[in-house]
Image (spheres, grey):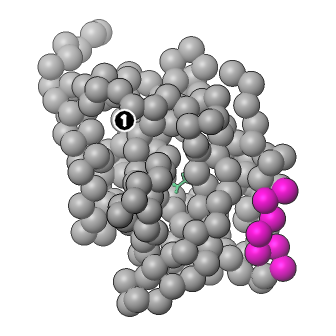
Amino acid sequence: MTLDTTQQNQQRDHFADQDAIWLFGYGSLIWKAGFDYLERRPASIRGWTRRFWQGSHDHRGTPDSPGRVATLLPEAGATCHGMAYRITPDVLGPLDVREKNGYLREVVTLRFNDGDTAQGLVYIATEHNAAFLGEAPLEAMARQIATAQGPSGPNRDYLLNLDDALNQLGVEDTHIRELAHQLRQVDDTTPETS
Ligand code: BEZ
């Protein structure tokens, strides 16, 4: 699959004149940043909901057997809880490369638990990118996640780590909880091969 959003993101240079930028994480960034940061704080954004609807050909799957990873879908009235990182602008270049399989930088309003707000960035893979998989029955998504793996590791670890991290934050996300539950069910009913 030919897809690389790196160049597009270099042009989305919002906050380029600032010394520090808030970045909202809602997927793997919640439990593993993989970059240096100045500060991290639990935060949320409104009008977006987390879904395992993005295909992963380069991290948690392969082109022949893509995994499923998180993206955000617009939804009126929804709130997505995650982790905000205050970063220096040089962090964004490598992140653009790491998330090049369809994710684009967007500007959002972050809300911290104490009521403070700040403008920041979030990476979102919309339905218009070539790796977007969209909705599927929960069991089908769980079966895909149970078997996919890529250079960053098994797809299942991504989902279960996210579920654990959200639980630790005290965040209730029905989609993630039900998908993780379904994944464990699939595990229990799939015979082991030797
Ligand atoms: C995140 O974990 O928030 C994230 C998801 C997709 C791309 C970049 C970051």
Report the residue that reaches farthest toward the top: 194
Instruction: Report the magenta residues as a range.
Output: 11-17
Q: Is residue 104 above or below residue 64?
A: below
In-image side of 167 versus 21 (left or right)? left
- For label 1, being within 8 Å of ligand 1 is answered no
Residue 129's place in the image compared with 87, above or below, is above
Please say whether residue 32 is visible from this viewpoint.
no
The answer to which image quadrant residue 181 occupies is top left
Left or right of residue 26: residue 156: left
Q: Is residue 76 above or below residue 140?
A: below
Q: Which residue corresponds to mark 1?
A: 156
Res 137 quadrant in image: top left
State whether residue 127 appears in this view: yes
Residue at 46 percent of width and 79 percent of height: 111
Residue situated in front as seen by the camera: 12 or 21? 12
Q: Which residue is pictured at 51% across the width and 36% down the height?
A: 54
Question: Which image quadrant for residue 143?
Answer: top left
Position in image of residue 47 (x %, y %): 44, 62
Q: Residue shown at 29%/9% (left/top)?
A: 194
What's the residue at 71%, 81% (across, down)? 20
Position of 156 with respect to 84 (left or right) is: left
Residue 42, x across and y down, in percent: 42, 75
Asked if residue 33 lies in the magenta stretch, the reply is: no
Judge from the rendering whether residue 37 lies leftward or rightward of residue 137; answer left or right.
right
Residue count near mark 1 (Cα–Cα under 10 Å), binned few <14, some 14–19, many ≥20: many
Q: Main secondary structure of the magenta part?
A: loop
Relative to the observer, which residue lies in front, 111 or 91?
111
Q: Position of residue 28 (x, y in %)?
A: 48, 52
**The stretch drawn in magenta includes residue 13:** yes
Q: Percent position (x, y) of residue 50?
A: 40, 51
In the rendered image, the quadrant that contains the N terminus is top right
Q: Say what amino acid the circle numbered 1 marks.
A: Arg
